[in-house]
Amino acid sequence: MDSSVFFSLRLSLQVAIAATVLIVVIGVPIAYLLARKNFPGKELLDIILTLPLVLPPTVTGYYLILAFGRNGVVGRYLYNWFDWSIMFTWYAAVIASFVVALPLMIKTGRAALEGVDRNLVNAAYTLGHSEWETALKVTLPLAKRGLLAGIVLSFARALGEFGATLMLAGNIPGKTDTMPLAIYSLSASGEQEQAAGMVVLLTFVAALFLYLANRYSRRIF
Amino acid sequence: MGLSVSVKKAVKGFTLDVSWQIGNELAVLFGFSGSGKSLTLQLVAGLMKPDSGVIKANGTIYFDSERNISATPQQRSLGYVFQDLALFPHMTVKQNILFGAKGVPKRETAERYHEMIDAFYINDLEKKRPSEISGGQKQRVAFARALMRRPDVLLLDEPFSALDTPLRIEMRAFLKDLRKTFQVPVVLVTHDAGEAAALADSIIVYSEGSVIQSGPAGDVFNNPADERVGRLLSGQETALRTFCRQNYNESRTA
Amino acid sequence: MSSIACLLLLSLITTPGAMASELTVSAAISLKNAFEAIGKLYEAKHPDTKILFNFGASGDLVRQITGGAPVDVFASAAQKDMDDMSAKGLVLPGTRVAFAKNIVVLVAPRNSRIKSFDDLASAGIRRIAAGNPKTVPAGRYAAEVFDYYKLASAIRDKLIYAENVRQVLDYVARGEADAGVVYATDAAVRSAEVVVAAEAPESSHKPVVYPIAVVKGTKNEAAAKAFVDAVLSKEGTAVLKKYGFRIP
């Protein structure tokens, strides 16, 4: 029942890293498709994927419950087949962070990939390289800066995610209370000093991460 | 050996409808900007698709709308040098050139690579990035890269247009040497009459999406088919003089 | 090598703490301190059950349960939310009980000169914090009290809505708001920083009754009922009184 500060910190990092990995694996290919391909419904897809950026997180959380709750569009199958619901588990926190931070990766990634000179891609094709090879060896490396910026933004957003997480994962001390949720609980029950302590810790962790990310990007560029 | 092109394509208020063929020679597609020369190259390379027509190189059919054949750019044995050279900025000179060796058996790749850097005098530049070498050096790297696979045809889209005059003249000599060494048909797109005069074995004159004259360079320059061609070759006197001087020089050194 | 593999496999399939069963209790955030204390008492008596609390705004909690969240016991800060649950068939029949009452009060920062609800209409009061009537029960009660004192139109432009009652308290404690409407139990938590300017008379709002019930579909009916009993027990009511709640 009692949650230690370090549990929340570890959970927050775990959730943010997992969400960011998912975001890169799923978001980069989507950004590539949006940047380089034309297909019917393309702009509609872009809008739907960007929505979580614009909606209040609690609303996004509500939609997530409609999707993943026991009676949800996806959730009902999980429940009927495996007798398991994602709600109130840390996986739900990962999903919530994934959904709200994905638009940041996609928008930034799309812009970076669109900025790659079309001639370079064509040159690679004329030199015999397939689209897939060209994407890996030419397009993606040339969009590195923008893609890294997208990753940093996504991770930061995932680390600070609150509203949608609260809805889908619940605020369960010792199980799903990430740092933002723990701070909310402490503050709400009048434990201001502990809350302030956690705020300082989270700020420090976030600042440390940004510092490391900047250093890394300077090194590889 | 050769390239035969017969294509139609309609784009944004402009229709391309051309038909020509060349053998083992340096052919120049000549005409004002916007007349469809670059578009033709892109169609030959497979970067764009004609509405209808046939494209054949060395007997291989790259495109045939009637028989529903359309090879991807990767499947066509072509070398292409873009107007801005399109060297990969994130790779070294060596990596750029080796990038052009896709499909070449490993044993041969190293051999060919050394052949190229010797032939094009790029030996000291291998580890440098494109941003660190000069315009002329970039040109040579771009050509080396395009030739690694020993393509059936070399397509050049105004590759020298960004160079200043002394370098342009140097590159013309370079191109001629290249033809001697690599014996590959070359299609050169240019709107510069002087360049056409200096390099062409045959000239194909473009205007507004059609070919209005084609033939051996000398014939075209001496007998422009009509007023339009004459106007296009309006650098004619200079071109003619350059042409004659080149021939005179060649015959002297031969 | 294979023994290591065996150990690894074993560690994956045996879940840690598989001995203890879990009970999930969703409760309005105003009940946090009291319920956490009651939870400790319960776990002392039932060592094989671990209680997982989920605190939030009553409205959000209902939405989670409707969406299929695995909750065993639900305690809200107003009858309305429990009525919603009942209407949706989510309450286990016979388990709904009113276990606590609260008083609605007007709070202000320590050095404030407000003495009554009527003072809210005066020009010196520029910002009044209250819960969002749509999601926060305390917000609905606040709205009823404002209507009772016929202040609704006078203060309409001064109202700041918060998503939970502790945030209202926080705004007032920090001086972000000149006054706020919270429960007596909340005011007690930050008695150093806020002062109770007035108590709302019982007739000015619907009674603030806290209902608790076992959620239908719980997989742990016995433990859930035992928890409700713990809340209603002598020790439970003592804890509630300690935190400022009244017992109906």
Image (tube, coloured by chain):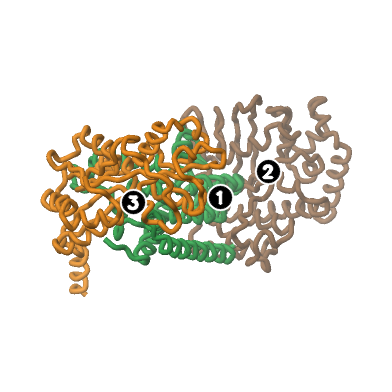
Chain colours: A green, B brown, C orange
Look at discs 2 and 3 and give the one toward the viewer. Answer: 3
Chain under disc 2: B
Q: Callout 3: helix, strand or loop?
A: helix
At label 3, counting other C-alpha atoms closer than 10 Å, the crowd grade (few under 14, some 14-19, many 20 or more) is many
Q: Are marks 3 and 1 in contact (CB under 8 Å)?
A: no
The residue tagged 3 is: C185
Rounded to the nearest angstrom, the CA distance separating label 2 from label 3 is 80 Å
Image quadrant of residue B59?
top right
Image quadrant of residue A182?
bottom left
| Residue C189, placed above or below residue A53 | below
**Residue drawn at the location 37% of the way across and 34% of the way down:** C144
Say what amino acid the circle numbered 1 marks: Ala
The residue tagged 1 is: A124
Rounded to the nearest angstrom, the CA distance separating label 2 from label 1 is 16 Å
| Residue C177, placed above or below residue C1 | above
Q: Are marks 2 and 3 in contact (CB under 8 Å)?
A: no
Chain under disc 1: A
Look at discs 2 and 1 and give the one toward the viewer. Answer: 1
* A22 with respect to B161 (left or right): left
> As rendered, which of C184 and C41 lies closer to the eye?
C184
Q: Which mark is residue B157?
A: 2
Look at discs 3 and 1 and give the one toward the viewer. Answer: 3
